[in-house]
Amino acid sequence: MRVALDTDTGVQHVLDRFEKRLLSLDRFEKEQPVLVGVSGGLDSIVLVDLLLHFQVPLQIAHVQYGLRGAASFKDADLVRQLAASTEVCYHELDLTNQQPERGSMQEWARDVRYAWFAQLAKEQSLGQVSVAHHADDQLETILLNLNRGSGLAGLSGMSDVRQLNSGITLFRPLLPFNREDLTAYARSRGLVWREDESNTNPQYARNALRQELGSMPLLEYRAFRDAGLGLQSRIAELKKTLLNALHETRHLSEGEWKALPPIIRGWMVLEIIREIDPEAPRRKTVVETVERLLSSQTGRHVEVGSVRVTRERDGLTFSPLFKDAWAEVGFNPLVLGSEIVVGGGSLRVEAILVEPSELNQAHQNEAYLDGDALGNWVVMRRWRDGDRFCPLG
């Protein structure tokens, strides 16, 4: 049911822009249900309100990390109340008292959140997931990426649309809207949201950057934001143009490869691979492995996630490695002579004759297995809790 609004000029302006945004989002289907990630903060509350106004069927998903004690539970209560008042299906993932075994808390929280969104969308037969990143988030992202030295790929920022996994697409409808837009809209609409006080904790890089940006005079910040997002938009458009030219055939000729600057080459390789397998690793070692393939003979190939990159006579071809049935169970068939990017490096499988005396001199990164005992099929599966691996070397 369409939500009726008593609109003032500011609200109507946001509504008009959002409607055009929905129409322009590649692959977004307004009539199809969408799973919306809702934290209880300003941006996600506004996103729900806008989607409901335009009669987009939706379900709400909230992750309860429990990291801020009573404040976290109040966030969840607010989101539950929103779902109940709008008669929207509500899902909650309770991660209270869970912590990452390694790595940063924010990276762990993001990975868990998106993995759950993808799983939940699949369980609910939803092909669309939406999150509420906005223009100020985009600026922070490209500045953080620039600080990490991620180059053009980082300067292209967060994409409007990307695949979460097979059949499920992630959308960011609010990227053109800044925080002032969303705040004015929410206040005019009388929306209720919660502020996350942990956003002021400078131990997290994004929060520290946010405080630095917040200390700038407002007019100076707006000019800086416009300039930064203008650059991001042009780079994203370049990315889209290049990828559209390649994704039809998923083929990169040797001439095209040599004509591209090295920084563009790596970017293109990772983007093509990501289009086929969103969960494939995105590292410098991937690009180096693919680049070495150009120096090999025709027919050789390397494997990155569930993507096979094959050396053709005139260049490289990117293709899905195995059927969805293999992907579901997490097994990866190994082919003799092939190279697979895994972990922090790559795995190569070769059939060789070796004397027993040579086994004592094996490198620590090598393992020797009895080929006759292995049989015709060798597969590698994903790491599971409790696994231990002790190569002979």
Image (cartoon, rainbow, N blue to C red):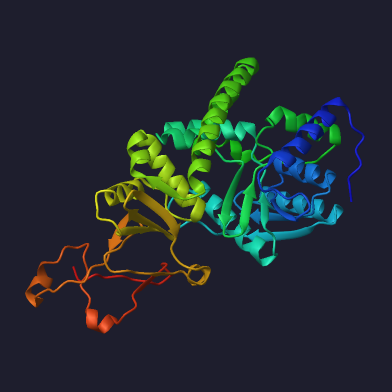
Q: Nearer the viewer, residue 365 or 244?
A: 244
Q: Is residue 361 above or below residue 291?
A: below
Q: Quadrant of residue 267?
A: top left
Rendered view: 92 above or below 203: below
Is the C terminus in the top left, top right, bottom left or bottom right quadrant?
Answer: bottom left
Where residue 237 sits, quadrant-wise, is top right
In the rendered picture of this protein, how many numbered marks are placed on residues?
0
Relative placement, left or right, of 355 versus 348 is left
Q: Position of residue 188 (x, y in %)?
A: 85, 31
Residue name at image x 68 percent, y 42 percent:
25
For the point 64% across and 18% down, the residue is 218
Q: Examine the rendering and report whether any part of residue 341 can be seen.
A: no
Answer with left or right where residue 297 lies relative to residue 290. left
Depth check: give the residue in front, 93 or 259.
259
Taking the image as shown, residue 375 lies to the left or right of residue 51, namely left
User: Which residue is at 84% across, 44% downward?
Assistant: 53
Q: Residue at x 45, y 31 (%)?
A: 146
Residue 252, horizontal then vertical, whole percent: 40, 46
Q: Nearer the viewer, residue 278 or 26?
A: 26
Relative height, residue 165 to residue 199 (above, below)? below
